[in-house]
Image (cartoon, helix red, strand yellow):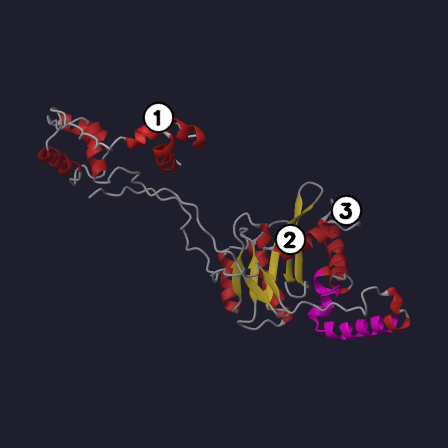
Amino acid sequence: MLEEAETLSQTVGVAEACRVLGVPRSKLYRMRKPKVAPKPHPTPARALSSAERKKVHEVLDSEQFCDVAPREVYATLLDQGKYYCHWSTMYRILQEYGEVRERRQQRRHVSYDRPQLRATGPNQLWSWDITELRGPSGFYYLYVIIDVFSRYVVGWMIADRESAALAKQLIAETCAKQGIKREQLSLHSDRGSPMRAKTVAELLIQLGVAKSHSRPYTPTDNPFSESQFKTMKYQPDYPGRFDSEEEARVWARAFFCWYNEEHHHSGLALMTPAAVHDGRAEEIYDQRREVLAAAYAQHPERFGRGEPVVAKVPGEVWINPPQEGHETISLAAPAAGENEPVAQAVSRA
């Protein structure tokens, strides 16, 4: 805009050009003035010479003072009968060499990988978790292992405590019952203490089962277990509080029988988990298609969108499906101790 005002001022004058273009005349006048290089800042007579500053830098980087703050260096030198400069000057000298910083390795937020797991059939990917059941004076603990592809509860138990030993027993018995072979299964869970226990990890190695963990404070990384617990606790007959562990066990037995055998799961095209887990989904699909085809042939006017299509069970199920352009995610657990804070001085030398 200033350049346009300068060009127009040659014809109509500065005042009129600035009025028309809405430009202050003072800015136009300042633009016309030649740029003058700033005068060099004079060096005070009391400033240290280059040789003296170099000497101070050598002292600060010496073996004695390389890990010591300038204030400490200043005081130590005074006690030794030496004076080079004030500690603020020491800071400025270190700043020139890029050596003024927080020298301790501060604790950093650990970046956990986003787990990505895929199942194309039963007994390829299991998810397990523990939830609390309120008792008369405390809680009972319900351990549940669910098959991610079929949503079939393959194993469960109720105990009076969270225990890695009990979790190990449940996992071992469930794998045996389902006939799990080596390198067949991945077991996913959150980061509770029983899930990360050494005894459970050793068992999975012996069984040839891969393990995976959710990111901390990320319940959406374990959605199938969380959803199953919500289905359970929102049942009309869920008591909210159990009078004894045996009462909780009796109720859970009836619930899991219903959940596996009778519950038509919305994520399974309204198939039951047992039908999908046992491989009967295709047969049920054909039967449903025949029923709807007969209904359509008898009363086509009742189907406004034409012949009905029967939904099929998804061919694959993901925990955190990959996003377009997303990098491949490693499921490796962080090395032991990497999330521990570290404070260690870093030498300027």
Residue 104 on image: x %, y % = 31, 41
Q: Position of residue 294 (x, y in %)?
A: 87, 73
Rate crowding at label 2 as few (under 14), some (14 to 19) or many (20 or more) other CA atoms within 10 Å: some
In this figure, which residue is indicated by the disc labeled 1? Answer: 26
Q: Earlier in the sequence, mark 2 or mark 1?
A: 1
- Residue 321 found in image quarter: bottom right
Quadrant location, the C terminus: top left
Q: Are marks 3 and 1 in contact (CB under 8 Å)?
A: no
Which residues, given as a range, are shown in magenta? 267-295
308 or 347: nearer the eye?
308
Question: Is residue 268 located in the magenta-colored stretch of the structure?
Answer: yes
Residue type highlighted by circle 3: Pro
- Residue 336: give x, y in percent of width and height: 41, 53
Mark number displayed over residue 66: none
* Residues packed near mark 1 inside 10 Å, few (<14), some (14 to 19) or many (20 plus): few
Residue in the image at 57% along x and 54% along y: 221
Question: Which numbered disc, 3 or 1, marks the residue that appears first in the sequence?
Answer: 1
Q: Residue furthest right?
A: 298
Circle 2 SS class: helix
Image coordinates of residue 55 in percent, x first then y, are 11, 36
| Three-letter code, disc 2 | Glu
Q: Marks 2/1: CA distance?
A: 69 Å
In which quadrant of the rendered image does the N terminus lie?
A: top left
Q: Is residue 345 above or below residue 52?
A: below
Residue on which disc 3 sits: 239
Residue 158 appears anywhere in the view? yes
Q: Earlier in the sequence, mark 2 or mark 3?
A: 2
Which one is nearer the viewer's eye here, 189 or 23? 23
The residue positioned farthest toward the front in the image shown: 11
Disc on res. 226: 2
Q: CA distance from mark 2 to mark 3?
A: 19 Å
Secondary element at tag 1: helix
